[in-house]
Image: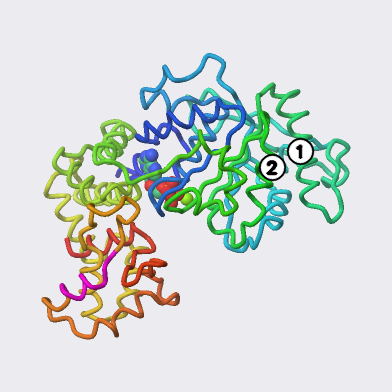
Amino acid sequence: MIDPEIGFTSDVIKDSNRFVGRTELLRNCIKSLNTPLSLIGIYGKRGVGKSSLARQVQQIAIGNTRSLINAGLEYEIPQSQRKYLTVYYQCDSMIENTEELIRRLLNDQNEEDGLLRLVPNEGKEIVEFERADELSGGVDLKVVNWGAKGVESSKYAKVVENDVVQTFRNFVNAIVTHQVKKKMKREGLLIILDEFDVIKNKSGIGSLIKSLSSDTVKFAVCGIGDDLFELITDHGSVERLLEEGSLHVEPMPTFESQEIIYRAEKLFRGEIEFNESVVSEIANISQGYPYLVQLIGKECVHKANELRLKLVDDHVFGQVKIDISSGKAFPTLERQYLRAIGQSEDRKKLLYILASQDEDRTMFDTEVGKLVLKKARRDADDLEIKNIDQLLPRLIDQTFGPALRKVPDMKGYYEFVNPVFRVYCQLRHL
Ligand SMILES: Nc1ncnc2c1ncn2[C@@H]1O[C@H](COP(=O)(O)OP(=O)(O)O)[C@@H](O)[C@H]1O
Ligand SMILES: [Mg+2]
């Protein structure tokens, strides 16, 4: 039996040996990490690989250049690469506003990624550690013992009652002085905020980031958005900071999706192999979403195990396709699917029509992915689906997903909330 997880994962990619492609984006990462004053903004659709890229930014920042070497970018690494200590925080939708975000950062006790771990404090024991992979060249700090006293007792970083912003500044300054400069002899502190888009009210955050950014403190924000300005609301204040570090993560080109499978074959060390035709087909049907490549790859290994084979050929893949199109392969996506269609055969057909509507590439770039209801009506007519107006509401209803949302300011336009789900709706009709 071969463990599919050796080669494939549906988790965020932390290990740079599993990270595939994204050469241009990585090139921009090195540039902006080596620019003393700039903000890094990572944006794109759900499931395209933003968090995985953000984790590579973290790796590069601590001096692990493996992903760069794998991407053939070794020559782009400056002799005196700027190195950082890093903080990584994943936001969630319970965070109402900027102040709440700062409060969360101040209290995050994550021992490998949290800000608090770096605040110099008596009794706290911090050790160097290497992130994720064996070949890593970089080290970061992690806490092995929080010490007996709370942070309040720190003689290096003063907590200011009722003023989280000032406390945050004090913490950051203490970290830069004692940990970044003195202890680790680095150039700066990098604070990465993932899922930044879910913070409800982001007003004031741009100017706060701007006032804190310096040649020793850099921020990276990562989240869903068609453009960076959608991600950062009061962008006026950070516009200039963003000139270098804007990273738009788009669906992967087909050859990079294929590369995920070739990389997996390497990780399996020849224990299992894929036929070239299968590799191409997986890359094609995944439509640039690495998450689906990983999921389908995993399924192929499961199936090969089941059939006691070491080669995923057209026959094995044929079986996998049957499992996918019958809804057996991916339970999480299937649950979403069933919830959206709500036992209506007609709605199932409508969802398929919507999911496979040609993306009109003659329109502006940002319009790719938008669906036109009028066009769907015509197709539905041809298939004799009745009452679109009764079928549609469930698809945009919060309680059932929602699968779709209206595109603001564009009458009659919809889009899939989750593009991976859109592709799944097509795969159900393989
Ligand atoms: N560069 C990559 N190489 C290989 N797999 C990737 C890559 N980027 C993303 N993935 C896969 O796709 C999944 C979704 O990526 P993730 O970074 O979580 O996307 P996002 O944050 O945009 O939703 C990951 O769990 C991982 O399995
Ligand atoms: Mg993410």
Residue 244 location (% of width, % of height): 50, 33
Amino acid type, label 1: Val
CB contact under 8 Å: marks 2 and 1 = yes
Callout count: 2
The circle on residue 119 is: 1
Residue 123 or 12: which is nearer the viewer?
A: 12
Q: Main secondary structure of the magenta part?
A: helix
Amino acid type, label 2: Leu
Residue 323 or 103: which is nearer the viewer?
A: 103
- For disc 1, the neighbor class at 10 Å (few under 14, some 14 to 19, many from 20) is many
Residue 248 location (% of width, % of height): 42, 43
Residue 351 location (% of width, % of height): 25, 71
Q: Which residue is mark 2?
A: 115
Residue 362, above or below 406: above
Instruction: Report helix, strand or loop for mark 2.
Output: loop
Instruction: Report helix, strand or loop for mark 1.
Output: loop
Q: Is residue 35 left or right of residue 98?
A: left
Q: Is residue 216 part of the magenta span, yes or no?
A: no
Kindly tell me whether residue 5 is visible in this rendering.
no
Q: Which residues are magenta?
A: 371-379
Q: Is residue 279 left or right of residue 47?
A: left
The circle on residue 164 is: none
Kindly tell me whether residue 370 is visible in this rendering.
yes
Residue 357 or 372: which is nearer the viewer?
A: 372
Distance from Cα at disc 2 to Cα at disc 1: 7 Å
